[in-house]
Amino acid sequence: MGRTRMGPLEGLKIIELWCIGPGPFAGMLLSDMGAEIIRVDRPNEPDYGYPDPKYRTLWRNRKAVAIDLETPEGVNTFKRLISQADGFIEGNRPGVCEKMGIGPDDLLAVNPQLAYGRMTGFGQTGPLADQAGFDLSFISLTGVAHAVGTEEEPVPPLILGGDFGGGGTYLALGMLAAILSAQKTGVGQVVDAAMVDGSASLMSYMYGGLQSGVWKDKRAANNVDGGHWLYRMYRCADDEFISVACLSPKLYKNLERGFLLDPKIFSFKAGRDNWKTLASKLQDIILKRSRDEWVEHFKDLDACVQPVLNMNEAPNNEHLKARKTFLTHGNVVQPAPAPRFSQTHSEIINQPPENGQDTVEVLTDWGFDESEISRLHREKIIGNH
């Protein structure tokens, strides 16, 4: 049994139907901030080849129940939980929950104030709504995938733009907005969180720049896409990298001093036509020292030069250690909850649960008596008794 939840969302109750990627990420954000998240598993979860649950950090700070939703009794059991919840998260294709008898109409009839969160790639409507896909499928339509990579070809980015940034983050934000609205109006609603919508929203800055002529619809041709010689990563003598992200004229003076740049050659105001040439010349300078030597050299200069750390190095970075950006819980190194709150602190209190491991505890806490729980288990409506 885990400790009592803490954080600014303490008291919120959200039911999460087992899903992958952006759905659990939204749940992690909410549970890290204190919401009580109950994950609903199938009694006999198929083996998807995932690692041991303790490493599936997106599912931390949850409790898990196993309910057979293919049975009427299982659906009724599920609805009893929903009747007490503030929100519900699911990540199925459009129409799947409706066929199960737990679609928006079904659950809002049970709980009119429910925030019903739906996480999909293409959304609930539109010609592609029923098609399958993964992060790259969705960001390919919104300009994100085209914008990332080298001048010659796009490069698949990490699943940040679709799954987590354009998906789970927007779902979590939408859930909170719907819950706040329900608290004021008494009326629940559906949150249609589509990765195509979210990833497009993340590109708002670029689309505004495109219409103004400031942003070029080409890779490595803009201030913040690796095109600018003052905003890219450079290889060092040891084949490691440093990042240079110096787009301020004031800070450029420090960069100029640090690299001993000849002002007759290098200029902060250099136009796009000169970016490649200046990048090549700066690369020649940077190749003369190792990454850590450059980091040491610039440590007292405010010049926006940082080491490009890998995932094994990042938790040991001096600044991140001081801020406790990473922590170890259950012998697993992982990012700490974010953002931080001055009064209602977030924390990790539970490791990711095994399939249905908290079924009895959760049902008891949510008003089921011992005889009911025994019967449901005996009839194989619930698991892990």
Image (tube, helix red, strand yellow):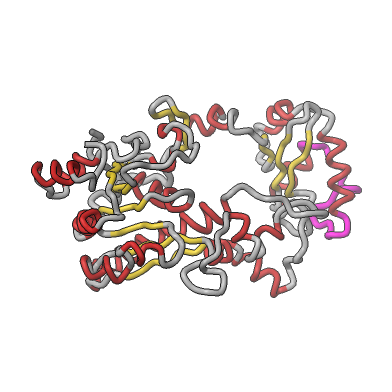
Query: Magenta stretch: dominant SS?
Result: loop
Q: Is residue 327 above or below residue 163?
A: above
- The residues colored magenta run 258-274
Quarter that holds the C terminus: top left
The residue located at (83%, 59%) in the rendering is 272
Q: Where in the figure is residue 171, as x and y percent of width and height?
A: 43, 59
Q: Residue at x 86, y 47 (%)?
A: 263
Residue reaching furthest front?
A: 379
Nearest the eye: 311 or 346: 311
Q: Position of residue 111 (x, y in %)?
A: 22, 66
Q: Nearer the viewer, residue 296 or 160?
A: 160
Res. 326 visible in picture = no
Q: Quadrant of the N terminus?
A: top left
Residue in the picture at 16% in, 49% down: 366
How many marks the image carries: the answer is 0
Q: Position of residue 41 (x, y in %)?
A: 33, 46
Quarter of the image where one finds residue 373: top left
Q: Is residue 248 inside the magenta stretch?
A: no
In the rendered structure, the answer to whether residue 113 lies left or right of residue 369 reads right
Q: Is residue 315 left or right of residue 117?
A: right
Q: Nearer the viewer, residue 111 or 131?
A: 131
Q: Residue at x 54, y 33 (%)?
A: 319
Instruction: Please provide percent x and percent y for residue 90.
Output: 38, 57
